[in-house]
Amino acid sequence: MNVVRRCISASCDAGLWCVDKAITIIGPLLAVLATGLILMVVYVYFTEFLPILVEKYGGFHSELLTLLGLWLVCNLIYNYMATIWFGPGSTPDVLTEEQKFAMLDDPELDEGMHYRYCKRCRKIKPMRTHHCSICNVCVPKMDHHCPWVNTCVGHRNHKHFLLFLFYMCTASLFYLTADVQSTINALTGKQESALFMISTVMTFSAFIATGLFLIWNLFLLATNQSTIEFYGNHLSREKRRYTSNPYNVGVFRNIEEVFGRGTTWWSWCLPSRAPPVGDGVIYPMNNSLNSSSSTSSAQQHAASHSSDSHTPNSASAAYSWRVRNGGGNGNGSEMNGHSHSHSAAHGASSRSLEDGHGVLQL
């Protein structure tokens, strides 16, 4: 029986390795293809669709529609390129003492561990970090590896990826509704131009696909989860140290963690190069840790405190970070009890061999 299990495990590993290598090879081609398809639809709009609009609605009305369309497509292209250019960010090679103490609250830690460790990158995994086997790096706040942008979606480019989906969906809707009758004729094969029919069918498909994916990602945004964390929260909750999503600090603050603080809601949709909130290592949390985990942590704290006569001063800095960023009970008024119970647990470190393949979404 053990031999069969080992064979199955080896076969699965080999299959995943082949998929990773295939995505690594075709990723750049898919990114070029996506860019080419977007530009093709823009070309069809100006050469074949715009004359229809001018004939039906006149020059002024058509010009206004075209300006709106250009605004949408410029934002679409900018955020698509920004998703690729900025990437998901990287994890630091060396962590500060404040970061190490705050990381003792990492919900993905196993019992008795002080931090998670990546055996491939050979360094500590910060909070919400996972190793992508396609990019072969640890990705902060990893959501998934997207072959259409040839990179992972994570801490640094999450905002741009969401805006790319938003503008892809709205730009497609604009193209389909600028003249509904022409769209219907193209979708039903009554349009004479084959290129116009092809572009309309592709736009309709893109609208459905990105619309559904946008709804899913808006749900994750509102609840402050990545795709990996969503499945972890629902499929293996009994193995975790928390009873619900520990990063959910309220809808508005969840959105601010991605789009930035101190800005108006409409400015979130404008082109921006500003980085997201935080350092990609420590994240604000609520107090949804399991009571059994808190009790165990308190016992470890007592044992550590009795054997070590002092607590490093950086523990107070970690505490201050948590309060400033809304740790504890969600309103920023107190520190999470689990973090407090670990404040003197600095010392021995355990290595987590947790490592795996990145989540791939098409």
Image (spheres, rainbow, N blue to C red):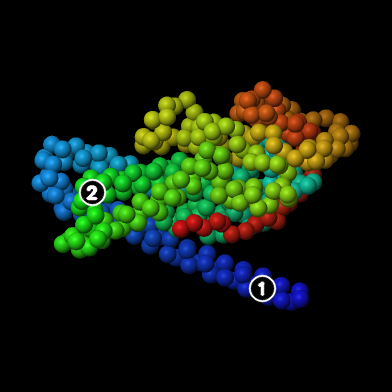
Q: Position of residue 37 (x, y in %)?
A: 30, 57
Circle 1 or circle 2, nearest the eye: 2
Residue 65, located in which quarter of the rendered image? Answer: top left
**Real-space Cα distance between discs 1 and 2?**
53 Å
In the rendered structure, the answer to whether residue 241 lies left or right of residue 63 reads right
Residue at which label 2 appears: 180
Few, some or many residues within 10 Å of mark 1 (<14, 14–19, 20+): few
Q: Quadrant of the N terminus?
A: bottom right
What amino acid is found at the position of numbered circle 1 in the picture?
Ile
Does the rendering let one see residue 95?
no
Q: Residue furthest right?
A: 306
In the rendered structure, the answer to whether residue 26 lies left or right of residue 122 reads left
Sequence-first disc among 1 and 2 = 1
In the rendered structure, the answer to whether residue 216 lies left or right of residue 38 reads right
In the structure shown, which secondary structural element does the residue marked by tag 1 occupy?
Answer: helix
In the structure shown, which secondary structural element does the residue marked by tag 2 occupy?
Answer: helix
- Residue depicted at x 44% and y 27%: 263
In this view of the protein, which residue sits in the foreground, 220 or 73?
Answer: 220
Residue 317, located in which quarter of the rendered image? Answer: top right
Does the rendering let one see residue 280?
yes
Few, some or many residues within 10 Å of mark 2 (<14, 14–19, 20+): few
Q: Position of residue 157 (x, y in %)?
A: 46, 44
- Residue depicted at x 49% and y 52%: 152
In this view of the protein, which residue sits in the foreground, 272 or 332?
Answer: 332
What amino acid is found at the position of numbered circle 2 in the picture?
Val
In this view of the protein, which residue sits in the foreground, 110 or 47?
Answer: 47
- Residue depicted at x 15% and y 53%: 47
Q: Position of residue 6 (x, y in %)?
A: 71, 73
Residue 186, located in which quarter of the rendered image? Answer: bottom left
Residue at which label 1 appears: 8
In this view of the protein, which residue sits in the foreground, 92 or 32?
Answer: 32
